[in-house]
Image: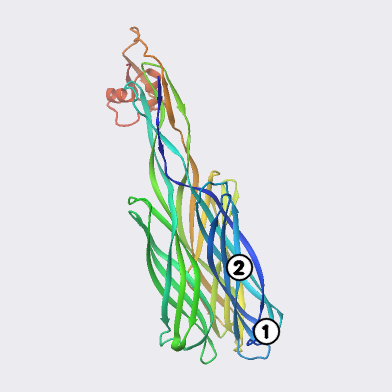
């Protein structure tokens, strides 16, 4: 007699590829007619803007670029001038061939940006951008549920709680704001550079919605009406939600990775700032599912042959976030720090057997007035490293973003800089669950009149299931006969009813 178990789909997303790439791009910048000849570079800054994503049947890509601002001292010794440019960057990842689209989660970080003088009218810009991307596609794993199993057949069932990625997407929204410098800030004459930083402070799943809240921080470096440089940060709160395809319980969690997809800024009269920005909250929903599996079967009355097939699921085993404090010093004294920027790169993971080392590079840039009052710039590299144990079948996905405002202070001989970044680590592994998919049952055997109806046996190291299977009993009968609440200790003498 053959019994086929019912197939049940396990909905989840499978990571086709998780990888970080880094690119260095250069671009020549020619000055416009109204700009003075370049004497020396004072400072270079950048803002990564992610323009779009592309999914083909065997590759996925992300198109982005760097908005670059260069502050330079003219050759004639006049007032510092600023020019802008755009450096396009694109990334591409090969993936297993797919017959339908999946989802790309990505984060593009500016690792460094600089410029050098080619001539009085030309500069060479250079930007290093790193991109972490995870390509996800719907999976087709199944579990198996027994149907119409005869009463004499005993089934060993176990339930595995497995955390799975269930669905992913993104919610686009915009900032269209008019901001004003407060009276306490120095009056602005001309903007030098902009930076928009997105910080997600709260993220959760409410039934069929992914809700996330936070702040956008628009940093502006500008020249005052007196000709000095000053900076100001505008804070723009946001609260967004995305409609989900399914409703989830209280245990579901969401990971939100924000993107800046467009940025337009304008400094108008009387300190008014016009901001138009395109934004996207990429989200990934995690939920724990209880997967019930039949792992073994037997009958005291007949022979039972089992058909097995392991089910492999992309389980998330751990998710942790920590705030890292970056600190670095440059050996230059200053009378005043005009501006400081911090660019965290993409984390790198180095595997050495069961040991994994996480490296996070970063770069500080400082613009300051030296002790003689001349405008100078300084660059300092920073790196964080941590080593931990990780199973050979596990892998780690890391997201990193700057949070808060970088700070700088000077002692007169050195300038110390501090910044913070949020590092989120998601550890995953292929979890294999043994599962019975069907049974072949033999004919019932006649009872042996010489077989005892009750025997005594020391429990030993076998569990109740194996004891029952070896002796032609059932777990229920042994439990009832010995008044057991749990598995017996190895030295326990058991009464085993023979059925």
Q: Is residue 195 visible?
A: yes
Mark 2 secondary-structure assignment: strand
**59 sits left or right of 38 in the view:** left
Residue at 51% from the left image edge and 74% from the top image edge: 195
Q: CA distance from mark 1 to mark 2?
A: 24 Å
**Disc 2: CA contacts within 10 A as few (<14), some (14-19) or many (>=20):** some
Whether residue 449 is situated above or below residue 77 in the rendered picture: above
Asked where in the image residue 1 lies, by quadrant, the reply is: top left
Q: Is residue 445 above or below residue 242?
A: above
Residue 384 can be seen, yes or no: no
Location of residue 252 in the rendering, given as x and y in whole percent from the top left corner: 37, 51
Mark number, residue 395:
none
Give the residue displayed 56% in from the left and 53% down from the top: 56
Q: How far across and how far down the image is residue 115, in percent?
A: 65, 75
Q: Nearer the viewer, residue 367 or 328?
A: 367
Which residue has dot 2 on it? Answer: 88
In the picture of the structure, the residue carrying the numbered disc 1 is: 38
Residue at (45% x, 81% y) in the render: 273
């Amino acid at each position: 007699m053959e019994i086929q178990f019912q197939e049940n789909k396990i909905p989840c997303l499978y990571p086709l590829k998780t990888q970080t790439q880094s690119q260095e791009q250069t671009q020549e910048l020619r000055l416009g007619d109204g700009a003075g000849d370049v004497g020396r570079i004072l400072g270079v800054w950048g803002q990564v803007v992610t323009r779009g994503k592309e999914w083909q049947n065997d590759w996925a890509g992300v198109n982005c670029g760097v908005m670059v601002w260069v502050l330079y001292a003219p050759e004639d010794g006049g007032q510092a001038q600023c020019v802008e440019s755009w450096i396009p960057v694109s990334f591409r990842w090969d993936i297993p061939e797919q017959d339908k689209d999946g989802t790309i989660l990505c984060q593009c970080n500016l690792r460094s940006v600089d410029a050098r003088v080619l001539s009085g009218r030309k500069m060479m810009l250079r930007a290093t951008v790193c991109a972490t991307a995870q390509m996800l596609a719907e999976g087709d794993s199944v579990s198996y549920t027994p149907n119409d199993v005869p009463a004499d057949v005993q089934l060993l069932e176990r339930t595995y709680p497995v955390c799975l990625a269930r669905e992913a997407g993104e919610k686009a929204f915009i900032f269209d704001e008019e901001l004003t410098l407060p009276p306490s800030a120095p009056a602005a004459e001309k903007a030098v550079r902009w930076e928009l930083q997105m910080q997600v402070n709260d993220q959760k799943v409410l039934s069929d919605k992914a809700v996330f809240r936070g702040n956008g921080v628009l940093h502006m470096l500008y020249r005052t009406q007196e000709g000095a440089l000053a900076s100001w940060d505008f804070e723009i709160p946001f609260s967004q939600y995305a409609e989900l395809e399914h409703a989830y319980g209280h245990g579901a969690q969401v990971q939100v990775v924000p993107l800046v997809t467009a940025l337009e800024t304008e400094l108008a009269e009387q300190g008014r700032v016009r901001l138009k920005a395109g934004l996207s909250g990429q989200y990934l929903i995690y939920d724990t599912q209880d997967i019930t599996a039949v792992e073994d079967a037997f009958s005291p009355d007949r022979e039972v042959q089992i058909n097995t097939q392991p089910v492999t699921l992309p389980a998330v085993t751990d998710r942790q976030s920590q705030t890292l404090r970056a600190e670095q010093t440059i050996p230059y004294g200053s009378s005043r720090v005009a501006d400081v920027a911090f660019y965290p790169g993409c984390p790198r993971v180095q595997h050495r057997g069961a040991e994994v080392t996480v490296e996070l590079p970063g770069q500080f840039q400082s613009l300051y007035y030296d002790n003689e009052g001349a405008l100078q710039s300084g660059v300092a590299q920073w790196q964080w490293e941590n080593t931990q144990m990780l199973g050979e079948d596990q892998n780690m996905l890391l997201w990193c973003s700057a949070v808060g405002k970088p700070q700088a202070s000077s002692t007169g001989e050195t300038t110390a800089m501090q910044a913070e970044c949020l590092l989120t680590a998601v550890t995953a592994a292929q979890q294999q669950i043994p599962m019975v998919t069907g049974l072949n049952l033999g004919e019932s055997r006649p009872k042996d009149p010489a077989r005892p109806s009750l025997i005594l046996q020391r429990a030993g190291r076998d569990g109740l299931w194996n004891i029952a299977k070896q002796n032609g009993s059932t777990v229920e009968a042994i439990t009832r006969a010995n008044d057991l609440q749990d598995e017996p200790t190895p030295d326990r003498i058991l009464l085993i009813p023979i059925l």
